[in-house]
Image (cartoon, rainbow, N blue to C red):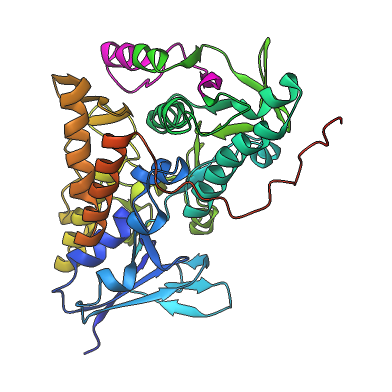
């Protein structure tokens, strides 16, 4: 009798943990991902701000699953899902059959219908995104050093982060440290400490999902670091040389987008109801309507919690969903006998800068150094592999002791887009 075939799309927190949970199952498991690596996205902003290198937060998927004899890995781009014929289709036309399918495709940044903004305001979801942002940030200081006119140099020393969620807060704080500490005394004509960092949030306060007291603490901490926090105003336009925020215009060549997510367009091929962000409105057991053997988890799923609100798109959510779904698959449990997925909220945390963070777990709220230590510990814990954990610890220690960031490398010419100076 042939083994049951389980296909997993996506090697993020959700997909990878489904595969790991099925390591002893008498099943044929196949994981498909468009890249060859698992990326630890919570630390991606540190790659974008030169604190870490990509190899310290990414691990080859094949290496993680090398001891699982029942599991294979394919690097490929899934373009459609045929739920009637129970098969997925890859970009080159290859078809892969399945008995169970787990879709964990994550999300990309959403520009809310203004996709033309992406050219001037990149988001942060992949290693390529992070490296692009890192290079633009670093090269901006080099360009400003060569520009005589103050008004022209200002555009390169203004940094605008759009979106006041955890990613935006962490990015704004990290850029402030780069400009005001790391780059200090590195230049002769400009003073990087005079750079202006803006954090823009359309809602009345940043970190809307956090308790108000913690959000206010984070805002005050950012302001002490030199970040100008603009709340209650919407971005109305983004151009090459600046951003319009209702009645405010900020000249800038460094606009970073952290304001919204959109699920993978692959989900549309399932032909099931989606929410406004393109996520599948899953059943209580995380299966799709009409097919109990197809599951959607992580950022691709609109799953509701106890308060009837969508579960947060964070790593613990995807990991818990992965273990739950893997359990159902191992038992081959029929839909009528499945207990609904229950999410255990372990709290939330965000770092603002060195020794500065906020965290809450139920009624427990932490700020400052203790929250920062907790943030460091949790993120090291979730990293895959001793080498990555050790490497990140070394880089963090170096940065903590010296204020320097060790990955300040630029690989392209500074001349592109640099105006000729008057002799």
The span shown in magenta is 193-219
Dividing the picture into quadrants, the one containing residue 418 is top right
Residue 248 is situated, as x and y percent measured from the top left of the image, at: 66, 12
In the image, 335 versus 353, the foreground residue is: 353
Name the image quarter holding the C terminus. top right
Residue 169 is situated, as x and y percent measured from the top left of the image, at: 41, 26
Farthest-out residue, bottom: 1
In the image, 198 versus 26, the foreground residue is: 198
At 45% across and 11% down in the image, what residue appears? 204
**Can residue 135 be seen by looking at this rendering?**
yes
Dividing the picture into quadrants, the one containing residue 304 is top left
Residue 279 is situated, as x and y percent measured from the top left of the image, at: 45, 44
Question: Relative to 396, does residue 128 appear above or below in the rendering?
Answer: below
In the image, 379 versus 182, the foreground residue is: 182
Is 212 colored magenta in this rendering?
Answer: yes
Is 211 colored magenta in this rendering?
Answer: yes
Q: How many marks are shown on the rendered structure?
A: 0
Name the image quarter holding the N terminus. bottom left
Residue 201 is situated, as x and y percent measured from the top left of the image, at: 50, 19
**Can residue 361 be seen by looking at this rendering?**
no
Question: Relative to 173, does residue 81 appear above or below in the rendering?
Answer: below
Farthest-out residue, right: 423
Q: Would residue 281 appear left or right of 286 to someone viewing this image? A: right
At 26% across and 30% down in the image, what residue appears? 349
At 46% across and 69% down in the image, what residue appears? 84
At 69% across and 26% down in the image, what residue appears? 153
Q: Would residue 221 appear left or right of 114 to someone viewing this image? A: left
Question: Relative to 208, does residue 339 appear above or below in the rendering?
Answer: below
């Amino acid at each position: 009798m042939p083994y049951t075939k389980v296909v997993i799309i996506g090697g993020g927190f959700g997909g990878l943990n489904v595969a790991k949970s099925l390591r002893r199952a008498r099943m044929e498991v196949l994981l498909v991902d468009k890249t060859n690596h698992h990326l630890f996205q919570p630390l991606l902003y540190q790659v974008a701000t030169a604190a870490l290198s990509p190899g310290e937060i990414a691990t080859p998927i094949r290496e993680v699953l090398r001891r699982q004899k029942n599991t294979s890995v394919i690097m490929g781009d899934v373009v459609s899902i045929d739920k009637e014929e129970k098969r997925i289709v890859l970009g080159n036309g290859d078809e892969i059959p399945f008995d169970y399918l787990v879709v964990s495709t994550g999300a990309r940044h959403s520009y809310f219908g203004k996709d033309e903004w992406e050219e001037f305001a990149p988001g942060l979801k992949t290693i390529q995104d992070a490296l692009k942002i890192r290079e633009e940030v670093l090269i901006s200081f080099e360009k400003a050093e060569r520009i005589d006119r103050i008004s022209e140099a200002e555009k390169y020393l203004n940094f605008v982060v759009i979106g006041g969620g955890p990613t935006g807060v962490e990015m704004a704080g990290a850029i402030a440290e780069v400009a005001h500490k790391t780059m200090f005394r590195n230049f002769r004509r400009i003073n990087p400490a005079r750079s202006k960092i803006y954090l823009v949030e359309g809602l009345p306060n940043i970190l809307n999902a956090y308790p108000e007291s913690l959000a206010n603490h984070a805002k005050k901490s950012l302001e002490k670091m030199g970040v100008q926090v603009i709340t209650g105003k919407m971005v109305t336009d983004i151009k090459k040389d600046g951003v319009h925020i209702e009645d405010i215009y900020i000249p800038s060549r460094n606009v970073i987008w952290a304001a919204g997510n959109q699920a993978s367009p692959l989900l549309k091929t399932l032909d099931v109801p989606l929410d406004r962000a393109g996520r599948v409105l899953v059943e209580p057991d995380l299966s799709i309507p009409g097919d109990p053997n197809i599951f959607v988890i992580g950022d691709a799923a609109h799953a509701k919690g106890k308060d009837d609100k969508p579960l947060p798109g964070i790593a613990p959510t995807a990991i818990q969903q992965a273990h739950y779904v893997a359990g159902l698959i191992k038992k081959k449990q029929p839909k009528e006998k499945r207990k609904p997925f229950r999410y255990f909220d372990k709290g939330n945390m965000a770092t603002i800068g060195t020794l500065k963070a906020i965290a809450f777990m139920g009624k427990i709220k932490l700020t400052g150094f203790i929250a920062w230590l907790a943030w460091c510990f949790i993120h090291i814990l979730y990293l895959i592999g001793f080498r990555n954990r050790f490497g990140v610890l070394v880089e963090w220690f170096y940065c903590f002791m010296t204020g320097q960031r060790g990955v300040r490398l630029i690989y392209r010419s500074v001349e592109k887009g640099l105006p000729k100076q008057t002799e």
